[in-house]
Amino acid sequence: MSTGLLIVGHGSRDSKANLEFEALVAIYRSRRPDLTVAHGYIELAQPSLITALRCLAQQVDVVVVLPLFLFAAGHVKNDIPLALAQARHEFPCPRFAVARALGVHPSLVDLAYERAKPELDGARELLKTAVIVVGRGSSDPDANAEFCKAVRLFTEGRNLGWVLPSFIGITRPTFVEAAELVARARPERIVVVPYFLFGGRLIDKISEQVTAFRSRYPWIKIEQATHLGRDERLFHLIDERMSEAIKGTHPLPCDTCQYRVPVSGVTDKVGGIKALLWSLRHTFTHTQAMPHVHAHRPLTKHVLVCTNADCADRGSLLLVAELRRLITEEGRNADIKVTRTLCMGRCGEGPTVAVYPDGIWYRGVTQADAQELVDEHLLANRLVGRLIDNIMQ
């Protein structure tokens, strides 16, 4: 029985980062002649994930998809399962298995410390040395928490003065914020550790911010370690994740949920509203990037309902439930999404409802208005004039 391994990378606008990833894939391919090893990208580079899946599915009996990501966030939890669902539909013969992301692993923590050690060895006193570990940052709280756990493991037993997690984007604390905070503690030295597998524009951005910090605080020595990069331990971890996937001992949780595959008699939810919502975000945020194929269609309507204290007191939770019920009855819950939000800044005039991509805000919407809102705006694309928040237009 032939086995193929598809190693999935994020993809970068920086061709050097893509070449670094592909060089790692090539080395792993030479180490495993028993496998058909291919690669694909989530976005920003070619071949795309779905293209690579289709190609590999025609060559082997078993396809193992391995996301070469440090942590499981939106791409691993949504984009990969969606592409797999499409591939399974198109190619019923090969068996598809998906591996976990690399995750919090002792070998990666040790590798990060090894990358930092040349800069730490130059310190006169470790207790007066601060380390700022920089992660990519995600809108997925679980991924951010896993990163912070890895930083904590990096800290244990090292006898360092300060070790702080930070992010280069999306969430906080940012690297700049962490560096400013550390500067107030007056360390003798700061070592910046990029917790990234590959180089690219984000590593360049970290370097630029380190240089800017150095010019603002010339009396604090600050050095930047190299990113994780290629290492023997990484190849062993790929072997480990692949073995788990083939044996079925640690499947990717999202690959077995009811929104990804048929579970018992539940088949109408495959595809997943939440997965579609996440993928919709990429439709808009990556339009400036090179064209790439997504394995999904964007939502038709996205309805935001304020469920903060004031609106909740006025019945917004009942409104959410009624909207979702009516949309489900119409069979449109795959392309119309209702999301609960925190305060939308219209306290005292709620419940507040916003409908996108139309950009229409409604106020004073109650459970009794749900049917009209669904029939008129969400289904017929006609505005409900009496409820429109004129201030927001």
Image (spheres, rainbow, N blue to C red):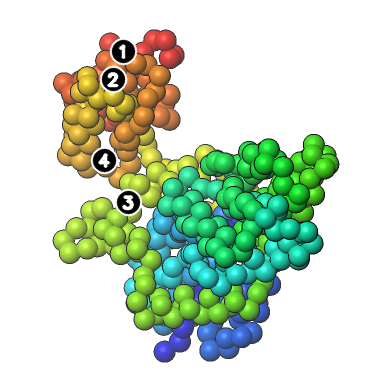
Q: Residue 136: x percent and y percent?
A: 58, 51
Q: Is residue 191 visible?
A: yes
Residue occupying the point 41% across, 70% down: 98
Sequence-wise, which precedes: disc 2 or disc 3?
3
Task: Name the residue at 31% across, 33% down.
Answer: 340
| Placement of the C terminus among the 4 image quadrants | top left
Where residue 223 sits, quadrant-wise, is bottom right
Which of pointers 1 and 3 lies earlier in the amino acid sequence? 3
Disc 2 residue type (three-letter):
Asp
What residue is shown with label 1?
Answer: 348
Upstream in the sequence, badge 4 or badge 1? 4
Contact, CB < 8 Å: mark 4 with mark 1?
A: no
Q: Disc 3 designates what residue?
A: 272
Q: Determine which quarter of the picture holds residue 264.
A: bottom left
Q: Which residue is mark 4?
A: 332
**Residue 65 vertical position relative to residue 382 in the rendered view, above or below:** below
Q: Secondary structure at mark 4?
A: loop
SS at badge 1: loop
How crowded pointer 3 is (Cα within 10 Å; few <14, some 14-19, many 20+) is rated as many
Residue 256 placement (x, y as % from top left): 30, 64
Measured in 3D between alpha carbons, the distance from the residue under mark 1 to the one under mark 2, in whole angstroms, is 7 Å
Q: In the picture shown, does residue 257 fall above or below 26?
A: above
User: Which one is earlier in the sequence, the residue at label 4 or at label 3?
Assistant: 3
- SS class, disc 3: loop
Name the residue tied to disc 2. Answer: 310
Evaluate if marks 1 and 2 touch, with contact meaning CB atoms under 8 Å apart: yes
Looking at the image, is mark 2 or mark 3 nearer the viewer? Answer: 2
Comes first in the chain, label 2 or label 4: 2
**Sequence order check: which comes first, mark 1 or mark 2?**
2
